[in-house]
Amino acid sequence: MMRPGVGAGAVHRIRRRRNGKAAERETAIRAAALRLFRRKGYEGASMQEIADAVGLYKGSLYYYVSSKEELLVRLFEGRAEQVLGEVGAAASGPGTARERLRAMVRAYVLGVLRHLDSVHVYLREEHSLPPTALKQVQREQQAMRDHFERVILEGTSQGDFVERDPRLAALALLGMCTWVHRWYRPRGRLTENAIADDYGERAVRMLGP
Amino acid sequence: MMRPGVGAGAVHRIRRRRNGKAAERETAIRAAALRLFRRKGYEGASMQEIADAVGLYKGSLYYYVSSKEELLVRLFEGRAEQVLGEVGAAASGPGTARERLRAMVRAYVLGVLRHLDSVHVYLREEHSLPPTALKQVQREQQAMRDHFERVILEGTSQGDFVERDPRLAALALLGMCTWVHRWYRPRGRLTENAIADDYGERAVRMLGP
DNA sequence: TACTTTCTACCAAACGGTTGGTCTGATACT
DNA sequence: AGTATCAGACCAACCGTTTGGTAGAAAGTA
């Protein structure tokens, strides 16, 4: 693939953010890309298919997006920060460590369940990201792990939990929670809230004395 | 892409299994493919790269493999069955439900840790598999879940566990265990056995009274 | 043993197709 | 006049795959 210099291809810098119609199209393109990237993978989906999905010619796509890679990167913007914020708030909120952990797990699981497509692509396409975007993703994941680790550590020193290895506990917890994206089906047996509540309970049970 | 009929492309059916040299090459090709599929994804890795990795022209690859897709499918042959067998044995073995579950988790986690590349590709490239291979994968995953669900159910009725939703418990457990493939680094802080033991303990704690 | 045939493993090149990306000139609507 | 898009040609790069050929080992034959 041609990899033009840093600023190249940015002829479209003209884009004004004020116009509402253009912003609509842009989100439609992102939505279509997200759906296709989930179903066929980033490499497996073509710009042609994305264009078809939004009813544009593929050339017209480049009026909104400067490259396929940029499109992928933009899909992640802000998504993780949101959940990270909610989990962080729960971690720093009031209540015992046990209560806070429960709230954190709830927030995290709900975050996963409410953005299934994003989570799928986020987790599968790490290796398609340019280095800087990849670093960002890794920072976010580390921040999430740190939140959990900290609360687990607090809970241990306060007697809420009995835990020899808070780091490992955080990883186990995050695995359990993240994995819901692989089996959850909307309109299935369990609602999002039911799963989130159950997992919160399960988490404190795994750590509790 | 041209999708020839079922048996097409099998011109190489001549291949005799006796020759040791050819078998060596074949495993080398599979190993290279596995490594590349993990690093760049199935669609992202090219036959050219695989050929380069084993020191062949990409055309020569087709002396050993009838298509890229077949190469992917063959990578999975037998892998899951092995772990499935070990977990099944632990599930049907002697001991209390608590002891058996511990052994199952241990076996499963070790299976994941010892085949990191396979697990990565196995989990990421589901959507690249042809329908029959996909069905096989789904059957295997269901069988694994059933093993856990059954032992959890037994343990609950015998008082070993307190669990309202064995199905959900199995999914939570499997998520926790499967996820180790995302963070484990060989020669890291923890050995494979340490992780497997810890997770076994964690599992019975999550379910136990 | 010497000669011939067959088969294996691979080369080297080409094939048809698709890809991401660019460009152009026209055009409808605001 | 500016924005958003059409319609389509075009490109170099790369894709998975096929083909025809061939060096050399193996096997068969004398």
Image: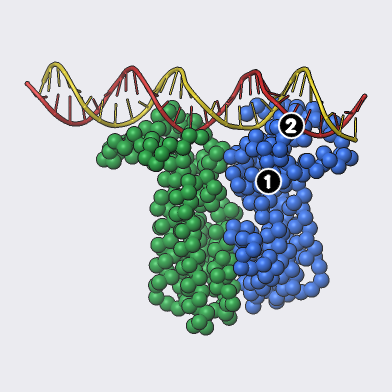
Chain colours: A blue, B green, C yellow, D red
Dot 2 falls on a residue whose secondary structure is helix
Mark whose residue sits in front, 2 or 1? 2
| Residue B203 relative to residue B136: left or right | right
Q: Earlier in the sequence, mark 2 or mark 1?
A: 1
Which residue occupies the foreground of this view, D16 or A150?
Answer: D16
Specify the quadrant of the image occupied by residue A73. top right
x 64%, y 63%: residue: A187
Question: Which quadrant: the C terminus of chain A?
Answer: bottom right
Which residue occupies the foreground of this view, A201 or A15?
Answer: A15
Subunit that carries the residue with mark 1: A
Mark 1 crowdedness (10 Å alpha carbons): few <14, some 14-19, many ≥20: many
Specify the quadrant of the image occupied by residue B43. top right
Q: Position of residue B36 (x, y in %)?
A: 51, 40
Q: For the residue marked with disc 1, what is the amino acid?
A: Leu
Q: For the residue marked with disc 2, what is the amino acid?
A: Ser
Q: Which residue is mark 2?
A: A60
| Residue B132 relative to residue A18: left or right | left
x 43%, y 59%: residue: B83
Q: Position of residue A188 (x, y in %)?
A: 62, 65
Dot 1 falls on a residue whose secondary structure is helix
| Residue A33 relative to residue B10: left or right | right
What's the distance in space between the residues labelled 2 and 1, CA to CA?
18 Å
Q: Which residue is mark 1?
A: A34
Q: Are marks 2 and 1 on the same chain?
A: yes
Q: Position of residue C11 (x, y in %)?
A: 40, 22
Q: Judge whether residue A154 can be spotted in this image.
A: no
Whether label 2 touches label 1, CB < 8 Å: no
Q: Judge whether residue B74 can be spotted in this image.
A: yes
